[in-house]
Image (tube, rainbow, N blue to C red):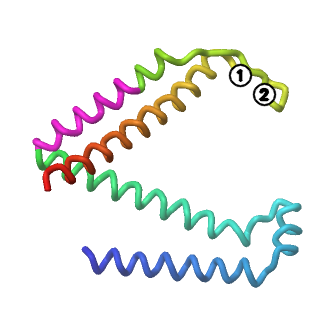
Amino acid sequence: MKKLSVIISLIIGILGLVFLAVVLISGDDLIEMKSLSGNYSLVSPIIYLAIITLLSITSITIYSSLNILFNKPENLKKVGISVAVFLFIVIISYVFSEGVETPMKDGKILSAGSSRIVETGIRTFYFLVVIALGLMLFSGLKKRLVK
């Protein structure tokens, strides 16, 4: 399995280098001129390669995670607890968030509901940062005190 992944990685890397060389040799002016007429043939291969790489790596990661998760039931409990804690943090963030209609630069108005969801995401991020910093400090202090 490792040899196969190394071979596939090499193929993707070589294809990426070839597509990059084609774009660099073509130059900005040619690419811009072709794109004005709707012809993206010089850039499209790189985009398709990136999409294929992203989808394949994401699929392999999800498959591996689910495989490990369902083969070891004790991990399932830990994941369930982690997901529950995360959802609890999101709910707390939503409760503390307020929605305010906000005018945007393009003249449209961001609704109060959408504004509340955006603020929920920001507050969730802040809560998770504070929790992570607290856990790192706790871990560092615990290591120093145990010695």
Q: Residue at x 80, y 64 (%)?
A: 39
Q: Where is residue 15, by image quadrant?
A: bottom right
First in residue order: circle 1 vs circle 2: 2
Placement of the C terminus among the 4 image quadrants: bottom left
Q: Is residue 86 part of the magenta span, yes or no?
A: yes
78 in relation to 39, above or below: above
Which disc is residue 104 wearing?
Answer: 2
Q: Amino acid at mark 2?
A: Met
133 in relation to 29, above or below: above
Q: Which residues are magenta?
A: 73-89
Q: Secondary structure at mark 2?
A: loop
Q: Secondary structure at mark 1?
A: strand
User: Is the Cβ of the residue at disc 1 closer than 8 Å to that at disc 2?
Assistant: yes
Q: Residue at x 70, y 81 (%)?
A: 22
Of the pair 9 and 131, the residue shown nearer to us: 131
Q: Is residue 41 part of the magenta span, yes or no?
A: no
**Location of residue 26 in the rendering, given as x and y in whole percent from the top left corner:** 79, 80
Placement of the N terminus among the 4 image quadrants: bottom left
Report the side of 100 relative to 2 (left or right).
Answer: right
**Location of residue 14 in the rendering, given as x and y in whole percent from the top left corner:** 52, 82
Which disc is residue 110 wearing?
Answer: 1
